Amino acid sequence: MASFGDLNRVNTNIQSLDSQLSLNRINRDLSDNQLKLSTGLRINKAEDDAAGYAIATKLNSRVAGLEQAMSNVGDAKSVLDIAESSFDTVMDNLIEMKSLSTQAANDTLGAEERGYIGDQISKLAEDINDIADQTVFQDTQLLNGADGGYSGSVDLTFQVGERASDTLEASIDAVNVSELFDGAGTGSISVSTAGAGALSFADGATQASAADYRGFLEGIDGAIESMNGRVNEIGMTQSSLSIREVTLSQSISANSSASSRIMDADFAKEQSESVRLQILQQTATSALAQANNGPQSVLGFLG
């Protein structure tokens, strides 16, 4: 800042230097202001607000994780929807098998008619195994048990949050003749346990009797109850995923809002600041011009 008597010296124009310093500061602030208006961000680099930049970066990282978790939840629901769709088809087959077995349990039918019914039920059982084989999501067989071994369950871990602990477990039991009808054989009706299993309704040339079918009805009821349990498990997991979906959506909104308050520029405030700085720029430029002309007064001493 110029001191008393500085205008009487020519070699160093202190008033001009002060005006230059002020103008440079105003130009710097105006440049920062224009950058904020052009990017829409209050913080464009760490030096603008080091603490705010660090906090916002962490929030943005969390939002990115939450958004991917939301996508993961959608994929998880797709997996369970595929399994549920197959369960519905299997259940339809079991209901048809129940109807046919009830028909064959009636003594009004002869051995030949029961043979035809047995063939139909065997084919429905093969269809159940085929459905399990064809229920696949991205090369993962969902209904053939652990490692495709036709027993046990496929255990899935869904990442439904941005933290390592934010997971949801799902278990899908194997669905095939061997698993559903284990121990259901009676009389001339037998259940093969090799691989996915198969149903047979004849012992050599002897067709299953009405009594055999009556005993087999309990096995079908057990298979239907087993499928109901599987559907219930999937339903509960789907419900949990839907709840997570809502929670994730709320978290994404809250964290995005927090990041916005830190990072985003207030355009009304920045525009007002721009007007103020432009006025100061003009006055500082005028002051610099006057300061540069100041030494001219020294010529009066030499007159």
Image (spheres, grey):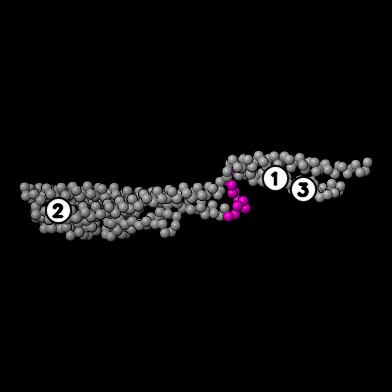
Residue picked out by circle 3 = 18
Can you give x and y, in whole percent of width and height, for residue 99 in the image? Answer: 15, 47
Image location of residue 57, percent across then percent down: 54, 53
Q: Earlier in the sequence, mark 1 or mark 3?
A: 3
Residue 108 appears left or right of 23: left
Return the residue at label 1.
26
Label 2, label 3: how many angstroms apart (C-alpha)?
102 Å
In the rendered image, residue 138, in percent from the top left (x then y), is placed at 36, 51
| Amino acid type, label 3 | Asp
Q: Residue at x 31, y 57 (%)?
A: 171
Q: Residues within 10 Å of mark 2 (few under 14, many from 20)?
A: many
Using the rendered image of the protein, determine whether residue 299 is visible from the camera's viewpoint. yes
Q: Is residue 45 magenta?
A: yes
Query: Residue 90 bears which disc, if any?
Result: none
Distance between mark 2 and mark 1 Cα atoms = 91 Å
Q: What's under tag 2, amino acid-wise?
A: Leu
Identify the residue at image location x=14%, y=53%.
Answer: 217
Within the magenta stretch, is there residue 288? Answer: no
Q: Considering only order in the chain, which callout, 3 or 2, is on the residue closer to the N terminus?
A: 3
> Number of callouts in the render?
3
Residue closest to the eye, 37 or 176: 37
Give the magenta-colored segment's residue range.
38-51
- According to the image, label 2 marks what residue? 217
- Give, as a three-letter code, the residue at label 1: Ile
